[in-house]
Image: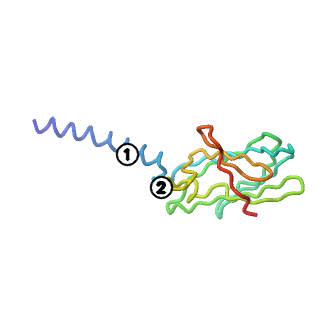
Amino acid sequence: MASRNNNFIFMLIPILIFHATILFASAGLLPFSSKHVIIFNRLITRATLVVHCRNKGDDKGVISLGPGDSFDFRFRVNLRKTTVYTCSFVWTNNTATFDIFRADRDDNPRSKVGVCSECIWSIYELVPCRDRRDGGQPYCFPWTS
């Protein structure tokens, strides 16, 4: 009888670990969570948008986006959850910067915008907006500069 209980426990433990990992990952509670940032040029003027994203250890290069075009990159959040990617945006007679990913905002279940594993951004002249997967109103933010 004891060996049947031991077998059950040995089978149950991996299942519980698997489910706990999925739960913590979906809630943004695991370190090194994988992120996918997608940036769309949604300028109303249909101008070309020049994007340059970087953090202190990773430069994504300068990308030129036509109207409706997108640019994406992937990374993992650092252990201390302090990862920040800042992008500069240039279009006709305008320059703006914005933190396109901030772990405290985009990988924090307690933030007003919640956790995103696929962080989809629409860039407009007036504001950058993080789109919602459920199709609801996007979260729009002021430009940093």
Q: Secondary structure at mark 2?
A: loop
Work out how far the residue at label 2 is from the one at label 1, CA to CA, in angstroms: 14 Å
Q: Quick check: marks 2 and 1 in contact, CB under 8 Å?
A: no
Amino acid type, residue under disc 2 in the picture: Pro
Q: Secondary structure at mark 1?
A: helix
Instruction: Name the image quarter holding the C terminus.
Output: bottom right
139 on left or right of 81: right
Q: Position of residue 113 (x, y in %)?
A: 58, 51
Answer with the quarter of the image where residue 102 lies: bottom right
Instruction: Name the image quarter holding the N terminus.
Output: top left
* Residue 20 circle label: 1
Above or below 18: residue 29 = below
Answer with the quarter of the image where residue 11 lies: top left
Q: Residue at x 89, y 57 (%)?
A: 93
Amino acid type, residue under disc 1 in the picture: Ala
Of 130 and 87, the residue lying toward us: 130
Q: Position of residue 61 (x, y in %)?
A: 75, 54
* Residue 30 circle label: none
141 on left or right of 107: right
Q: Residue at x 65, y 49 (%)?
A: 139
Of 7 and 64, the residue lying toward us: 64
* Residue 31 circle label: 2
Of 27 and 137, the residue lying toward us: 137
How packed mark 2 is, by other alpha carbons closer than 10 Å (few <14, some 14-19, many 20 or more), is: some
Residue that extends furthest to the front in the rendered view of this protein: 137
Q: Position of residue 74 (x, y in %)?
A: 62, 48
Of 92 and 127, the residue lying toward us: 127
Q: Report the coloring of the rendering.
A: rainbow
Q: Residue at x 15, y 35 (%)?
A: 4
Q: Counting residues from the N terminus, which is met first, the one under dot 2 or under dot 1?
A: 1
